[in-house]
Image (cartoon, helix red, strand yellow):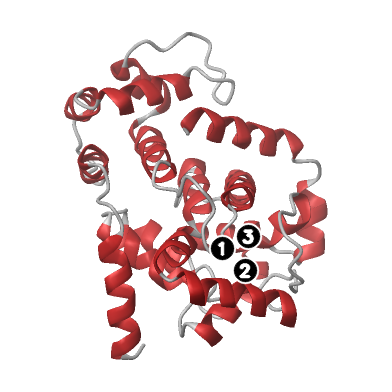
């Protein structure tokens, strides 16, 4: 990446609002395997908005817990520290999305694709994971993999819109058009934003590498790459023509190609509906 592009990206990232301090603290605490649940509960309870949204989500149909959760302390017992962290991450990031469409950025379509990718990534991890990551890790990675698009749309609107037009006119993927017009694609700026917001290193790497199809990746990244492709079949949200195949390294992880994996997953409408419920409650 040349210096001019790096400076341009840094300027855009600087304009993004700061991530909530409480969520940054949650991320810091849960990165320590000896994290005290009591300290985590205290951090969340000092953020009344986050507390309200977490409890609302926990008591939604998405989790369908046997008992109503009335306290953050009880939520940690029921779903665990890592899931609470991922819920907080999701809630905070969704709150950063533009309230109206800018530069041809359709927030509704963006969310449709992100939700589908999150649901499928979670499903893939549940079926193929080897405990390197939890399903909720892959859900959040799928949900946030395209966050760089939000940065481009808000702070580089002309070139972003031009990239969209090139993508449609030349029938190529948006990230390929971004590389032509801007010099780097949204995955790069997304990873820079993840660094600024102090996301876990594994999540930053996944965001940054989800279009690096020739680069070996870990379980989370491969789930997101496969889900990103599969979502265009299970829940299409745009008309862009794109080769919907799995990179060889990703196909090897799942032991099957795109068509076989698509058939193997079968009907995932309940997973997509559950993810939509998650979003509606989190927003």
Secondary structure category for the residue under label 2: helix
Q: Earlier in the sequence, mark 3 or mark 2?
A: 3
Residue 111 visible in this rendered orientation of the protein: yes
Q: Which residue is mark 1?
A: 222
Give the Cα distance between marks 2 and 1.
Answer: 6 Å
Disc 1 is placed on an element classified as: helix
Q: Please name the residue shown 26% across and 22% down the image.
A: 48
**Quadrant showing the N terminus:** bottom left
On screen, residue 132 above or below 84: below
Kindly indicate the quadrant of the structure image that contains residue 261. bottom right
- Residue 225 horizontal/vertical position (percent): 59, 63
Please give the residue where the numbered disc 2 appears in the rendered image: 250
Cβ atoms under marks 3 and 2 closer than 8 Å: no
- At horizontal 53% and vertical 20% (from top left) the residue drawn is 60
Q: Mark 3 or mark 1: name the one nearer the start of the chain.
A: 1
Q: Residue at x 28, y 52 (%)?
A: 17
Q: Position of residue 164 (x, y in %)?
A: 62, 72
Q: Which residue occupies 51% across, 62% down? A: 221
- Residue 137: x, y in percent? 45, 46
Contact between marks 2 and 1 (CB within 8 A): the answer is yes
Residue position for label 3:
228
Q: Nearer the viewer, residue 236 or 36?
A: 236
Left-right relation of 60 to 112: left
Pointer 3 and pointer 1: residues touching (CB < 8 Å)? no
């Amino acid at each position: 990446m040349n210096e001019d592009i790096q400076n341009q990206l840094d300027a855009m990232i600087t304009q993004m609002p700061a991530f909530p301090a409480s969520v940054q603290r949650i991320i810091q605490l849960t990165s320590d395997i000896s994290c005290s649940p009591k300290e985590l509960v205290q951090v969340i309870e000092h953020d009344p908005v986050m507390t309200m949204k977490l409890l609302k989500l926990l008591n939604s149909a998405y989790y369908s817990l046997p008992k109503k959760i009335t306290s953050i302390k009880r939520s940690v017992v029921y779903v665990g520290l890592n899931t609470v962290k991922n819920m907080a991450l999701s809630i905070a990031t969704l709150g950063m999305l533009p309230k109206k469409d800018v530069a041809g950025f359709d927030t509704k379509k963006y969310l449709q694709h992100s939700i589908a990718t999150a649901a499928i990534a979670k499903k893939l991890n549940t079926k193929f994971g080897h405990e390197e990551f939890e399903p909720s890790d892959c859900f959040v990675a799928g949900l946030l993999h395209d966050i760089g698009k939000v940065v481009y749309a808000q702070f580089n609107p002309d070139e972003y819109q031009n990239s969209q037009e090139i993508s449609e006119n030349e029938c190529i993927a948006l990230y390929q058009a971004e590389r032509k017009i801007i010099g780097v694609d949204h995955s790069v700026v997304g990873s820079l934003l993840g660094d600024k917001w102090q996301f876990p290193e594994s999540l930053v790497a996944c965001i940054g590498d989800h279009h690096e199809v020739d680069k070996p990746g870990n379980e989370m990244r491969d789930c997101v790459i496969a889900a990103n492709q599969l979502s265009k079949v299970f829940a299409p949200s745009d008309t862009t023509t794109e080769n919907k195949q799995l990179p060889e390294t990703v196909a090897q992880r799942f032991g099957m190609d795109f068509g076989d994996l698509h058939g193997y997953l079968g009907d995932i409408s309940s997973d997509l509906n559950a993810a939509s419920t998650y979003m509606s409650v989190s927003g």
